Image (spheres, rainbow, N blue to C red):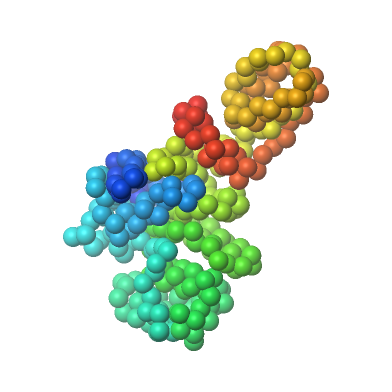
């Protein structure tokens, strides 16, 4: 990614963001997203991903704390932040009986900065059918329409809730390419939520893991890839303790472990005299599964 000015405002800054519902509380969340960054908000359904994005977009008012977008506070009585946000959510507010083309024409008259050329470029790139009413579009084409609407006014911050849901593999790949390209100039940022873990290894620079309304870990994608390993070895000792191990299976003297601190773990195994040591890398989505399974335990160890 390109560099951004060190004195520039963050693309988004969450400070103590809290929203309460019966039986569930989101936050308090503290999170800073710099321009030029693609951050994946990773978590299972019900973790609070959609609520986080809705608060950041100004669609839901938090009970405490708040968000700034490029220095502008996200508040119902302030409109400055809206020009910098492109949002794709579960409900996108299109007129269902209107065609995709008519919906885009309507939005072009409301959103400052709308570019007809930019909109047409994304329409062609996504192969979006413009002549069909929205209520006749497939789920994937509705997502394409929402993406065109979110991108056409040139926002500097994209907030995307499950942006690849319902897309076929070809279009999904194209969407991920577009999102990556947008951040190349270092002036734009993308925050997208997902439970499709295969997406994160393709697009995200950084990962923020949300579980039960709490941010349990934020880390760089490459940092995870370098530190986590799956290891098998032979060792007769019982009751061994290895630093960084989050999963340990043993059948007699045969061991299989997953460690988040591979270098330290392997050094300890050498000191213990472990034999037949085999090390294999893990994919980012495999690591993400482990973090979400372990939750706060892994987060505390890595923080």
Q: Residue furthest bottom?
A: 131
* Side (left or right) of 297 relative to 31: right
Instruction: Note whether 85 is above or below 233 in the view shown.
Output: below
Q: Is residue 259 visible?
A: no
Residue sitting nearer the eye, 135 or 252: 252
* Side (left or right) of 236 relative to 265: right
Q: Residue at x 81, y 23 (%)?
A: 276
Q: Residue at x 63, y 19 (%)?
A: 242
Q: Residue furthest right?
A: 276
Where is residue 236, by image quadrant?
Answer: top right
Instruction: Note whether 95 is above or below 290 in the view shown.
Output: below
Q: Residue at x 62, y 29 (%)?
A: 247
> Where is residue 220 shown, x and y percent of the image?
52, 40
Where is residue 86, by image quadrant?
Answer: bottom left
> Where is residue 50 shown, x and y percent of the image?
40, 55
Q: Is residue 18 visible?
A: yes
Q: Residue furthest left?
A: 77
Residue sitting nearer the eye, 195 or 228: 195
Q: Residue at x 60, y 45 (%)?
A: 285
Residue sitting nearer the eye, 19 or 104: 19
> Where is residue 116 shown, x and y percent of the image?
42, 79
> Where is residue 95 shown, x and y percent of the image?
37, 79
Number of residue marks:
0
Residue sitting nearer the eye, 125 or 258: 258
* Side (left or right) of 48 relative to 283: left
Instruction: Note whether 33 is above or below 158 in the view shown.
Output: above
């Amino acid at each position: 990614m390109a560099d951004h000015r060190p004195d520039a405002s963050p693309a988004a800054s969450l400070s103590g963001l809290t929203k309460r519902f019966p039986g569930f509380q989101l936050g308090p969340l503290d999170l800073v997203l710099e321009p030029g960054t693609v951050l994946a908000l990773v978590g299972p359904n019900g973790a609070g991903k959609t609520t986080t994005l809705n608060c950041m977009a100004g669609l839901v008012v938090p009970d405490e704390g708040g968000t700034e977008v490029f220095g502008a506070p996200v508040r119902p009585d302030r409109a400055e932040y809206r020009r910098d946000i492109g949002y794709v959510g579960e409900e996108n507010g299109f007129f269902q009986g209107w065609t995709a083309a008519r919906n885009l024409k309507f939005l072009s008259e409301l959103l400052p900065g709308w570019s007809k050329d930019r909109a047409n470029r994304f329409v062609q790139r996504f192969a979006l059918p413009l002549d069909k009413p929205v209520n006749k579009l497939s789920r994937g084409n509705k997502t394409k329409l929402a993406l065109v609407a979110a991108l056409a006014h040139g926002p500097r911050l994209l907030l995307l809730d499950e942006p690849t849901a319902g897309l076929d593999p070809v279009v999904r790949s194209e969407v991920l390419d577009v999102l990556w390209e947008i951040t190349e100039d270092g002036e734009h940022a993308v925050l997208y939520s997902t439970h499709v873990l295969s997406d994160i290894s393709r697009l995200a620079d950084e990962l923020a893991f949300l579980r039960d309304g709490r941010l349990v870990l934020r880390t760089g994608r490459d940092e995870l890839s370098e530190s986590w390993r799956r290891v098998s070895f032979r060792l007769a000792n019982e009751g061994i303790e290895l630093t960084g191990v989050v999963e340990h299976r043993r059948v007699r003297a045969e061991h299989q472990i997953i460690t988040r601190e591979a270098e330290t773990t392997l050094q300890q195994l050498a000191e213990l005299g472990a034999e037949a040591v085999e090390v294999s890398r893990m994919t980012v989505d495999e690591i993400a599964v482990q973090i979400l399974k372990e939750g706060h335990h892994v987060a505390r160890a890595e923080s």
